[in-house]
Image (cartoon, helix red, strand yellow):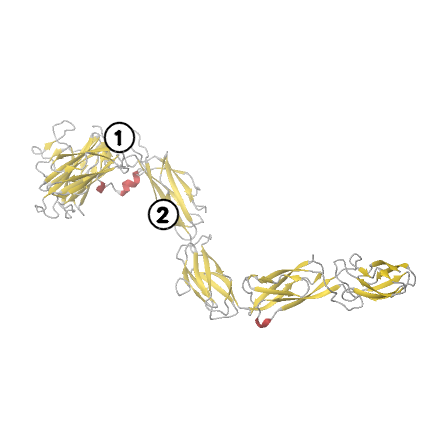
Amino acid sequence: MRKMSLALVLLLLLPSCENQDRVADVPDIDENYAFVGSFAPTSWTVISGGAVGINAMVVNPVNKGIPGRTVTFTITSGPGNLSADSLVSNEQGMVQVLLTTQEGDVGSCVVRATVGDSHKDATVQIVDPGGPGEEGTPAAVTLEADPPGVIANGHTSATVTAAVYDQWSNPVTDGTTVKFAAGEPFTDVDGNGYFTDGVDVLLEDFDLDGEWDAIGAIDATATTASGVAVVTYNAPEDTGAVHIKATAGEVSEDYMLELLPVPEEMEVASILLVASYPSMQVKATGGVEATPVTAYCFDALGQSVGESWEVEFEIIHGPGGGESLESQGYGPVSRVTDGDGSATIIANSGTISGTMYVRARSGDVYSAATQITISAGPPEYISIGVNPGNMRAWDIEHVPALVSALVGDLYHNPVADNTAVYFTCDEGTIIGFDASGVAYTDEGFAEATFFSGDPRGDGVIEITASTKGGTVIGRTGLITSGPPASIQILSYPTSMRAAVESEGTVLVRVLDVNGNFVVNGTLVEFDLDHGIITPTAITSDGLYDSVAEVDIYGEILRLDYSTPGPTDDGVGAWATLTASAELQYGASSQVNISFTTDRARAQRSFVEIPQLIPAGSTMPIYIYVKDGNGNPLGDHELALTVDGGVIDESVMTDSTGEALATFVAPDSTSDVILRVDDVDPNYGGMVLIQKLTVE
């Protein structure tokens, strides 16, 4: 057999999609194993004076385009001119040359494309616009074989396709007969489509026996459908080449098909992986839980490799719900090909929906991963929510809230899209996909809109979502609150020290006209007539409560507001705390807080008297009593003694903490010691000593 080189193939008649898929990942094959495909123009007929583009593709034996190869073009017979003598194939292996004609040119132009030592011819009919020829009459034939080379083992085959056109490049009439012959190349002198001894000319005698020999077997005739006739060629056991001739009417075309030697060892070159059911359902939910996954193994020429080849299957990614290959986890799990070169394993779904990717490997050859969708089962659970959960809407029309339901199957996977969910409410109105209360899931979620309005009740609304004929139900609540109507002071410090470092908190709850929680952010105002308090706060939550909290602090009192009394009761003032929240009719809530004082302290208390007292004079003496924080202490009894002169024996402090005593100085100059004893039974015990100078 002569050395084969690169091939040219018609762009318009590529091999079938199935074969392309199978060999898509096969690498380039050495030039010595390439073979000649076919070559043809984009239009079979050109009007005299016109032009036609002629496409060619440089391919390897499995029809994969080869870039960067030089293709030489020549006209071997007939009129016409070419736009280029040679072109380099692009990334897809394609080239295109332009054939131009002159007015008056008629007849057949044969264009030859050459790569290395291989060539192919294409015939273009140049016709007179007013010339003869009927529509539908065969004027040109193109011929293709899939695959373009077959192994000569006595049982492999190729599909041969003949496309027949009229002189206007339209497909010929359906039912046109096409004749086929397969053997040594010959010139069909009598034009009957077959070799006739003594008439036709043998062009090449492969076996040198002096006779034309058929090579392999092919259907003798076929009829066109949509301009195409298809037959099967069965290869012999001898290697070499076979020339296939297709004849329709008075036109014919030759195609050389390579007969390749049987490889010493057939190897897997590509794997096509197919799942019988590309979509399953999670297990135990009543759907398809398992699918056969089949690996079809091919050699470098796209032929089945046959039996006894080991194939490993593996899940390379999955949702992680226990999906497996025949209950053996993610694998790899090994199987062996049968007679048609395929191996099959069963993929099982798990409990989680999602996508599972399975890949097959034989030796160093991997398939593309096949995708299997694991869908959720029927609805089993609904969780429903509403946003916002409380809105200021009880006495307002058409305030919206978004209601959403998440629907899950037995394993809490989101159910299939477009599952119907029905929404209802006992107050207001709820609208789903249209004016009704039905909505449809998207990734497990279904959404509807609630609008406030009639009918109205207590403002606490029950919203339901149901599916699966009402057997799966979810419920949630919505508060449509009204204006604030009442406020409760929940906690506060009933007593605080009258000191700047004293602090506490006040917590209030605000309710609406129906006794429901008001909306989050309702303003609350505070007032306190003693001490210091944060003047405003806003309520929080609104779903489980509606409370506001502020800080309260003590202060130093100007007076002892709890006087008069027989003794000090320890209370410096009773403060009134008022809380209001924009309540109807000006309603509010009040509580009292006591601000307490401490014992009298000498460090804070003092006696006020002139530094020099005239002898024998009568002078007022002011005594001030305060606790350790500086708060004035009223109702304290003070016992007074002097070691010279006369003074009141006892005085009482007033609300300012002040007491007034009268001192009668002695008649002679002397120093007098004044002693003040705080004898209050509760908060007394303080002693003040003051030196008085009498002149």
Comparing 420 with 54, the one in front is: 54
Q: Residue at x 65, y 68 (%)?
A: 590
Counting the numbered discs, the total is 2
Left or right: residue 688 compared with residue 427: right
- Residue 31, which numbered label? 1
The residue positioned farthest toward the top in the image shown? 208
Residue 168 in picture, x, y percent from top left: 14, 46
Kindly identify the amino acid type of the residue bearing the numbered disc 2.
Pro
Check the picture and name the quadrant holding the C terminus: bottom right
Q: Earlier in the sequence, mark 1 or mark 2?
A: 1
Residue 564 picture location, percent across and down: 77, 69
State the residue position of label 2: 278
- Label 1 crowding class (10 Å Cα cut-off): few <14, some 14-19, many 20+? some
**Residue 96 in view in this figure:** yes
Circle 1 sits in a helix, a strand or a loop, which is it? helix
In the figure, is residue 438 to the left or right of 112? right
81 or 42, which lies in front? 81
Distance from disc 1 to disc 2, alpha carbons, whole Å, reads 39 Å
Is 101 drawn above or below residue 433 in the view shown?
above
Residue 44 in view of the camera: no
Say above or below: 37 vs 681: above
Q: Nearer the viewer, mark 1 or mark 2?
A: 1
Query: In the picture provided, is 296 more to the left or to the right than 394?
Result: left
Looking at the rendering, which quadrant does residue 652 occupy? bottom right
